[in-house]
């Protein structure tokens, strides 16, 4: 009997050890409970920040609206102030003007010029027009460019600024004889 009790005790201790090992194994296989609240909060903050930036960008006026606002305060052709200021502006075409054929069979012109203020007043707004004309002075294509303040904040007295623009869509049959520049809007600073 004693022998059987020892065996029973031994068996009992082995069963207890086995059950303990089983508990350990099942605990190892159990995945810890994860909390995704940090990821959710972080994602929501990110979405809110993106929405704020998008709203800010969408509320900014477009480039065309900004140009229209600047030009609204400038003197236009026909106004006495325009004639007084425009007579001191000299625009010349640079030697680096090139014509380039493109893949669509048309020609693009990359026009380089220099705008010089020969007057004594500070120019704060200046828009110029570059027109490509034929031998009979007929305009083939033209483009307006806001030089001041877009390319340079202001144009001081007796100073100059380079102007670069491209005009696309010329056909190979177009007679691109010359480039005519003109001032289309101007304003002097106080």
Image (cartoon, helix red, strand yellow):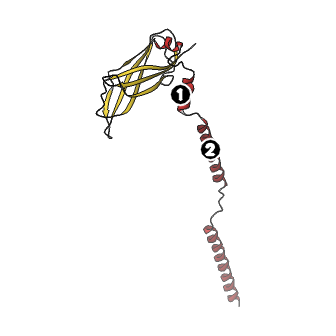
- Of 57 and 89, the residue lying toward us: 89
Residue 141, given in percent of the width and then of the height, sits at 38, 29
The answer to whether 115 is drawn above or below residue 37 in the figure is above
Horizontally, is 16 left or right of 77 in the view? right
Mark 1–mark 2 CB contact (< 8 Å): no
Q: Secondary structure at mark 1?
A: helix
The answer to whether 170 is drawn above or below residue 148 in the figure is below
For discs 1 and 2, the disc positioned in front in the rendered view: 1
Residue situated furthest left in the rendering: 173
Q: Secondary structure at mark 2?
A: helix
For image coordinates 48% across by 11% down, the residue present is 157
Horizontally, is 105 left or right of 81 in the view? left
Residue 54, given in percent of the width and then of the height, sits at 59, 41
- Of 8 and 177, the residue lying toward us: 177
Q: Name the image quarter holding the C terminus.
A: top right
Residue 163: quarter of image: top left
For image coordinates 60% across by 40% down, the residue present is 53
Residue 138, given in percent of the width and then of the height, sits at 35, 25
The answer to whether 102 is drawn above or below residue 143 in the figure is below
Horizontally, is 24 left or right of 90 in the view? right
Q: Earlier in the sequence, mark 1 or mark 2?
A: 2
User: Pointer 1: what residue?
Assistant: 67
Residue 48, given in percent of the width and then of the height, sits at 64, 45
User: Pointer 2: what residue?
Assistant: 51
């Amino acid at each position: 009997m004693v022998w059987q009790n020892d065996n029973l005790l031994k068996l009992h201790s082995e069963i207890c050890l086995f059950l303990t090992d089983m508990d350990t194994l099942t605990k190892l296989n159990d995945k810890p409970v994860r909390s995704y609240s940090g990821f959710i909060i972080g994602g929501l903050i990110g979405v809110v920040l993106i929405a704020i930036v998008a709203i800010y960008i969408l509320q900014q006026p477009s480039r065309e609206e900004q140009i229209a606002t600047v030009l609204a305060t400038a003197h236009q052709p026909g106004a006495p102030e325009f004639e007084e200021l425009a007579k001191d502006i000299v625009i010349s075409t640079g030697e680096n003007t090139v014509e380039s054929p493109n893949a669509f069979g048309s020609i693009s012109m990359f026009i380089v010029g220099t705008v010089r203020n020969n007057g004594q007043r500070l120019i704060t707004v200046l828009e110029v027009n570059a027109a490509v004309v034929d031998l009979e002075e007929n305009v083939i294509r033209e483009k307006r460019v806001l030089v001041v303040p877009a390319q340079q904040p202001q144009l001081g007295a007796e100073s100059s600024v380079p102007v670069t623009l491209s005009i696309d869509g010329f056909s190979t049959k177009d007679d691109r004889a010359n480039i005519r520049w003109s001032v289309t809007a101007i304003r002097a600073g106080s």
